Image (cartoon, grey):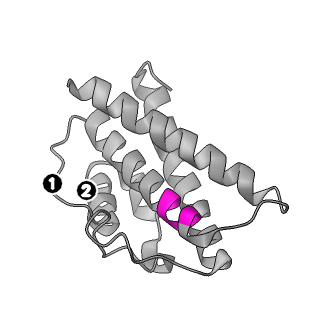
Amino acid sequence: MKTAQQSKELYQKANEQLSLINHAWQNPGIDNLSLLFCQGVKECMYNFLRCFLMIKKSKIKSTDNLGDLVNQCAAIDDRFKQIDLRWIVCKEHHFKTEADIFCTSTQQVQICTWIANGIKKLVDDEIKKTGVPFA
């Protein structure tokens, strides 16, 4: 699969997930299943960061670690240095191999959702700047 197609799919998947999560937070009648939200937000961040690296045609180091992915993005674009991961408990855990690690606090998951929205904004800005035709 071509890199452009892969980055497009990652972006679309992450964007759809984040939209659903943002919608659920705004609807108090929906049961906030922390596990579902936590894993969804982690996957959104992971996909947005990988998408950015693909757009920049940067080799993605073999990692499933959010902290490492943010550092790779920050090495390319200083705007990613503003992403503060110290509030993300699982930032050093591997996304796929340690999927059983999640937050049960809705406040913690909401903080992660805010961070995911910040990452999405940076990726959206890059898409607009570079004219990548899939957002």
* Part of the protein shown in magenta: 36-41
Name the residue: 74% across, 59% down.
Answer: 25
Residue at numbered disc 2 = 72
Q: Nearer the viewer, residue 127 or 46?
A: 46
User: From mark 1 to mark 2, how far is it between C-alphas?
Assistant: 8 Å
Residue 43 in percent (x, y) is at 43, 55
Q: Residue furthest right?
A: 29
Q: Nearer the viewer, residue 55 or 46?
A: 46
Q: Nearer the viewer, residue 4 or 94?
A: 94
The picture quadrant where one finds residue 53 is top left
Residue 63 in percent (x, y) is at 20, 60
Residue neighbourhood size for the residue with mark 1, other residues' Cα within 10 Å, grouped as few (<14), some (14–19), many (≥20): few
Q: Identify the amino acid type marked 1.
A: Lys
Element type at marker 1? loop
Name the residue: 64% across, 53% down.
Answer: 21
Secondary structure, magenta segment, majority class: helix
Name the residue: 29% across, 31% down.
Answer: 6
In the displayed structure, 47 sits above or below 35; it is above
On whether residue 120 falls in the magenta region, the answer is: no
